[in-house]
Image (cartoon, helix red, strand yellow):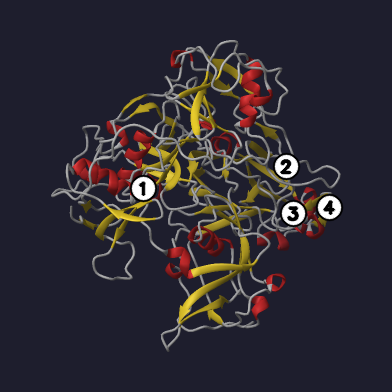
Amino acid sequence: MFEGVWDCRTFGNHCSWATTTPPTQGTTSPKPQNDRLQFRLVGYPRKHNEGRIEVFYKGEWGTICDDDFSLSNANVLCRQLGFVSATGWTHSAKYGKGLGKIWLDNVQCNGGEKSIELCKSRGWGNSDCTHDEDAGVVCKDERLPGFVDSNIIDAQVDENKMEKVRLRPVVTTKKMPVTEGVVEIKYKNGWAQICDVGWTTKNTRVICGMLGFPHEKKQHQYRFHSVACVGTEVHLAACPLDTVRLKGGAKLGEGRVEVLKNNEWGTVCDDRWTLLSASVVCRELGFGSAKEALTGARMGQGMGPIHMNEVQCLGTEKSLWNCGFKNITSEDCQHVEDAAVRCNTPYMDLENSIRLTGGRTRYEGRVEVLSTKASGTKSWGLICGGAWGTKEAMVVCRQLGLGYANHGLQETWYWDSSNVTEMVMSGVKCTGNEMSLSHCQHHRTVSCQKTDAKFSAGVICSETASDLVLNAPLVQQSVYIEDRPLHMLYCAAEENCLSKSAASANWPYGHRRLLRFSSQIHNIGRADFRPKAGRHSWVWHACHGHYHSMDIFTHYDLLSSNGTKVAEGHKASFCLEDTECHEGISKRYECANFGEQGITVGCWDLYRHDIDCQWIDITDIKPGNYILQIVINPNFEVAESDFTNNAMKCNCKYDGHRIWLHNCHMGDAFSEEAERRFEKYPGQFNNQIS
């Protein structure tokens, strides 16, 4: 036996080799954490809310026989799995045969029992069945309130056999991630090295994936794959690349899977979605193997096309496009079935240089960072709260592994529980995508107007977040011009919904020319969109008879072809409410009678073209080609899981009498090539315009 040394390169490069014997086949059961029953859904092919039902009893996982099985049994089991009810059940090992014990047989529930053990049966372990008769359940895809939401297709590996893998550096180094060292596995209460007998590069590939690296070291690297030429291009560089990206995740290496086809991004349906296919995505993006394959839009729903269905990968493919899959028809899948992944990523030790203090839970508190003084000691310090906002809070929550940011706070006097008082960082400005606060811009030397600790930065994190997107086709379909008399625009003028030249108009005579359209704003995230300010601070506007819960909810801008703003409008949140919802989702927010404001997940708020301020004042605009740009939540007042889809753009042609919009799309819906073409040629794209 001897130690194996590993040489790795991080994030999209390579790693090579270790020494071990291949893991032996077979399973042993994990020891029970307590005497409480545990349940899981397993098998293949399946979705997250269906599968062979297995129960953990006396330290061993086992199955339930389908004799006398009923929907009442399934209802009890689905509730124990965290779902509201069952929609069906299966017999004859539809999801594959289990192993080990058949714990229950001839189960007969009334349906109202709190646990399967309260139902009639032959007793634990007393069965005359074989695993050919293993029962399965199909649960309604709606979780019980407060139940931990997993919806994961897991690896079903025995973690007692090999909990963790690590690299121990041969030479002491503080560099992260560790890219060279001895492979060790967590065994019992310590770490053990691995024998090299029977070691192959296939073993190396598995270890690399577990540690967050895409594959073992090779002589050749593939930078591009799945080049999709149509045959008329004059150069390979002009051919579009079919690629993949992750959207809506809180951490690096997780998110909804989206693929590029015909210059347009779309999602992947979760039918037959497995860890093998998820691992191809992860490695294609430069991460390790997949830790989890998620179904049921667990990273939020996409908008636009669904490009792939029933993806079946072997696990060795260079790209998801190399796997077998079916093309989509509208009947096959909806966005509630969008697939997602969580990838293994290299350990970077980022969470140990930052902490939250004083909060009621671990998800909130005053932000403290570890700084090195001139003397070389390590000490904790505060961040100046001036200009601190949502994007900075997003980075902190990500760095600590606490999900999404709910709020970035500039005062934290109510969390004054620490003896740390020194400001060590100021002027922090993040894009929101950084892995660590140290990667954001900040002052070289601390410059803070309010140095008292109560004015230091704080955050509130959350496991879920909202995500707003506009219905781009509706904007394009509903656009028109109205010449509206000034005597009908007094309220709009009061709310600053007209261009500056309106102030010098001959009121109440004359008119303003308005570019009008409807906007339908969907919440496709995993948490309701709520105004940052509570109702106690909402502003009453008597002229229109409503409360404003946000100062600026949407920006409407008309840009010249070079990007210069030539006209603008804005939308204070007249009222945020659920106008309509997808089937099976109930409205929660309604503005009438000073009601709660917000947009529920799976619902949308419709601002019709005929309400005040749902326009851009183009009275002073000359005929020509323009770009219409609409941005939701432009000041990042409310946290979202993804801000890149908050903008929408359209090509706009105005001839002085009529107006046309075409090519309307969300800001991240097209490929980079299509976006460049859109910006460069903002004029006619089709024969709809004369």
CA distance for labels 4 and 3:
16 Å
- Which of the labelled discs sits on residue 543, or is there none? 4
State the residue position of label 1. Answer: 672
Q: Earlier in the sequence, mark 4 or mark 2?
A: 4
Alpha carbon separation for disc pair 1 and 4: 45 Å
Indicate which label's residue lies in the foreground, 1 or 4. 1
The dot on residue 549 is 3
Q: What amino acid type is highlighted by mark number 2?
A: Glu
Residue 62 versus residue 631 in the image, above or below: above
Determine whether the residue tagged by mark 1 lies in a helix, strand or loop: helix
Three-letter residue code for mark 1? Glu
How many residues crowd mark 1 within 10 Å: few (<14), some (14–19), many (20+)? few
Question: Residue 201 is drawn in which quadrant?
Answer: top left
Label of residue 577 in the image:
2
Q: Earlier in the sequence, mark 4 or mark 3?
A: 4
Answer whether labels 1 and 2 touch (C-beta < 8 Å).
no
Q: Nearer the viewer, residue 344 or 638?
A: 344
The type of residue carrying mark 4 is Cys
- Distance from disc 1 to disc 3, alpha carbons, whole Å, reads 36 Å
